Image (tube, grey):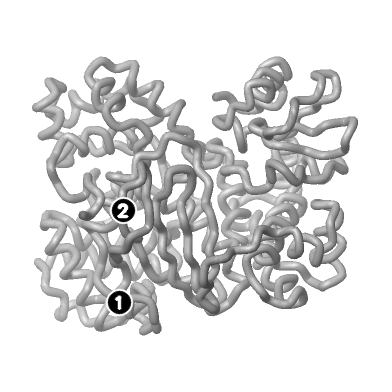
Amino acid sequence: MQKGMHTDTERCVRAVRSKDARFDGWFFTAVLTTGIYCRPSCPVVPPKAENMVFHPSAAACQQAGFRACKRCRPDTSPGSPEWNQRADAVARAMRLIADGVVDREGVPGLAARLGYSTRQVERQLLAELGAGPLALARAQRAQTARLLIETTALPMAEIAFAAGFSSVRTFNDTVREVYALAPGELRTRAPKDTSRATPGVLSLRLPFRAPLNPDNLFGHLAATAVPGVEEWLPHSLEGVGGTPIGAYRRTLRLPYGHGVVALTPRPDHIACRLTLTDPRDLTVAISRCRRLLDLDADPVAVDGQLRADPVLAPLVDKAPGRRVPRTVDAAEFAVRAVLGQQVSTAAARTHAARLVTAHGTPVDDPEGGLTHLFPSPEALAELDPETLAMPRTRRTTFTTLVRRLADGDLHLGAESDWPETRAKLLALPGFGPWTADVIAMRALGDPDAFLPTDLGIRRAARELGLPSTPAALTARAAAWRPWRAYAVQYLWATDSHPINFLPV
C-alpha cells in the first residue's frame, strides 16, 4: 500500500467494485448523487465511477458535506494501517488524536507534544488527510457518541459530555449532520440486544482486517499476565474458528479514571466488554485496546512481503495473520521489560506481581480476580531499591528508568519518535539492544523493531537454517523490512513456549 491511495482513482474504483474489505480504512468513497460516504466494502450496488470521489478520512468526507452510510457504517472501519507503520509527524498526530489528546489538551497541546507549531500541524494534517486536527477529533467524537447511543441507556446529556462535546446542542447538531438522524432516532434504530446486559458494562465489537491469528496474540498476553492486573478467564464464548475459548482481561489506567476490559477473539471481530469509572474514557480505552491487539494492521501487506522469503513462507502459510502483541501502557511495559531481563517468564511475572501488590492502586472487579492498576512511574520512583529482589545492577537500571519516566525526562507514548526514543533507552544504564528493541516493538509500536539477540529468535534461526549470530541475522532480515517485528512473531512460533498458544 502507498501513501495517498485516495488519489489513485482507478485503483479506488476497482476496490469499490470488488467490495474489497482489505481497503476499509485506507480511503472512503463519497457519492455525489446521494451525498453519503461509504467504506470500500459497502454492500450496496456500487455507484457509477463518475459519481464517486475519494477521501483519505471520514473527517474529510464530513467536512465536504457528506453523511455516513447507514448500511456499511464507514465511521466504524478499522483505522488506517498508515498510522501504525510510520513515525513521521502526521502518523504520530493521528495516534495522539485517537488517544483523545485534542479533546483533553486542544490543538496547542497536540502541537506541543509533537514539537511543532499549531500552524505546521494543521497544514500537514490538512495536506494528507483533507481535514485538520479539530475536524478529525470531531469525527472521532461523533463515532464515540454513536457507540454510546446505540449500546448504552445513558441519558443523551451524559453521552454528549462523555463523547467530548462541549454542549448538548453541539452534540445534537453534529450527530444530525454526520448521520442524518437525531440522537434519539439513532437509538431507536439500533439493533436490540436480547442477551442479558450487565449494568455499567459496555459490549462492543472491535473490527480488524482478516486474517487474524489469535494464537500468539492472546497466548502471549495470557502467558505473561501479571496477577492482579491481568488474567485469562475461561468461558464458553465461541472464538476464531468456532473453538470455545476464554477472555483476556486487564485493568486500565485512563485519563479520567480507570477501567476493566475483557477481550475475546471471534471470527470477524474482537468482542470487547468494558467497565469504566468515567464514560469520558471510552474513546481512549478503545484506542488502547486496538493498539494492544494490533487491530489496525494490514496482514495482507505484511504476510505478502514475508512470504516472499522461502524460509518464512511455510511459517506464514501455516498460520497467516499473526499480529504483534503490544500494550495499553508504554511506561508499564518498559518497567516489565526491565523486570524480565535475563529471567524466565514466570520469574518476571513474580517480580511484577510483588510490585503490584505493594505499590499498585487497588480496584474492584466484581466479574473476576483483578485487584490493582499497575503502579505508576511516580509510585515506583518512591520505593526503596533495597526491597527489590534482583541484582544490584538491575536495581540501578530499574530505578533510573522509573525516575526518568516520573520526571518526564523520558516519555514513552503515542507521539514517540521511534529512533530517537530507542537512542534514549540505549543511553540508560543496563539497557542493551534486546531491552530497547522489545520496548520499541511492543510499547512504541515500531513494526520494524527486530530482536536478533533474543534466545528464542536465535534458536529458531538455527533450526530454519538462517544465520544465528546477531549481525548476520540482521543482515539477512533486511529483506523483511519494514515488517521485522512481524517476522519475530513467526520465528517465535516455531517454539513450543506457551506464548504461542491460546490457553486451553
Residue 258 appears left or right of 442: right
* Nearer to us: label 2 or label 1: 2
Task: From the viewer's side, name the closer residue of 362 and 445.
Answer: 362
In the depicted structure, whether residue 214 falls above or below residue 46: below
Q: Going 29% across and 17% down the picture, which residue do you hit?
A: 309
Task: From the viewer's side, name the closer residue of 132 and 215.
Answer: 215
Amino acid type at circle 2 is Pro
Percent x, y of residue 187: 74, 64
- Residue 204, quarter of picture: bottom right
Quadrant (top left, top right, bottom left, bottom right) of the C terminus: bottom left
- Residue 55, quarter of picture: top right
In the depicted structure, whether residue 478 falls above or below residue 153: above
Where disc 2 sits, the SS reads strand
Q: Going 35% across and 48% down the picture, which residue do you hit?
A: 325
Marking on residue 369 = 1
Query: Hey, which residue is sitting farthest right in the picture?
Result: 33
Residue 429 appears left or right of 116: left
Q: Going 73% across and 19% down the picture, which residue do you hit?
A: 9
Amino acid type at circle 1 is Gly
- Residue 77, quarter of picture: top right
Confirm whether residue 444 shows in the render.
Answer: no
Number of numbered discs on residues: 2
Where disc 1 sits, the SS reads loop
Mark 2 = which residue? 244
Measure the C-alpha gap from mark 2 to mark 1.
21 Å
Percent x, y of residue 417: 48, 46
In the depicted structure, whether residue 237 falls above or below residue 253: above
